[in-house]
Image (cartoon, rainbow, N blue to C red):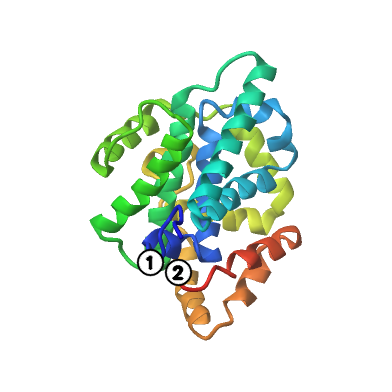
Amino acid sequence: MEYFVEKGSVVREIWGKGDTILFIFAGASAEFALNKAVDWLYFTGKLPADPLGRLFSTVTYARNIVFSKKEAACKAIDKITSIHSSVERNRGSLIPDWAYRDVLFMLIHYSIASFELLERKLTLKEKEEVFDVFHRFGKQMNLQGLPENFNEWLVMRNNHLNKHLEKSIYTIDLYKQYKKHLGRIRYKLLLEAQILVVPQEVNKLLKLGKFSLLRSVLILYKFFRKIKIDWFLKSMILPDKYKSEIKALDAFPKNL
């Protein structure tokens, strides 16, 4: 039986833990807000109405593909392409290829950054595994101009960060929505989490700061995780609306 990501891959380990996915979500929420193509996400009205739900659904969808059989994963990716094509027809213009690439690049970066923050440093081979999964994702979507290897991705990623990000009215509005939906304390935690995983270019535009108060808290969290009570901390920082969804992410498939 062939899976989109074979058992034993570090990508399954990364996407099989809810805490890692939370940091992927935190980083993506920052970079999404700065992307010059974020107006596309405003077109349907779904993003400003429920920014956390919209971003969380994107991350969850990617996670489900990671653990799917190859045929099912390809069908799910084709569905994503179909949905985007429908939005393009309704708007009467095309989403630029670089915007699609940016999303894939985000998933690669935050997969690596989040896992290294919470677990350990990845080897070059493991990073190449992460790249390969999302490269195949992009190929299935028929995206043009994808990098062919991890080193090419590093160069393109840097160029994208310098060319495709800006602090706009959409950025300001999205952060207002984050604060509205999270509340003051949880919003502050989101910002602290973003400091730990976002690239320097993102941090500079958002003025997040250099030091995160969460860094010391992570030491306590890792201890709680060892004695199997890490959910206690998660339950304190997550909105009730998303607790069951995040808890489900920890129920990753056996025999990774």
Tag 1 near tag 2, CB within 8 Å = yes
| Image x and y of residue 136, in percent | 40, 42
The label on residue 8 is 1
Q: Is residue 155 above or below residue 241?
A: above
- Read off the residue under disc 2: 256
Residue farthest to the front, as pictured: 1
Q: Residue at x 37, y 43 (%)?
A: 200
- Seen from the viewer's position, the closer of residues 202 and 252 is 252
Q: Residue at x 41, y 35 (%)?
A: 139
* Marks 1 and 2, the one that precedes in the sequence: 1
Q: Quadrant of residue 168?
A: top right
| Image x and y of residue 241, in percent | 75, 58
Q: Is residue 169 visible?
A: no
| Image x and y of residue 185, in percent | 66, 59
Is disc 2 placed on a helix, strand or loop?
loop
Q: Is residue 87 above or below residue 209?
A: above
- Name the amino acid, label 1: Gly
Q: Quadrant of residue 183?
A: bottom right
Is 83 placed left or right of 70 in the picture? right
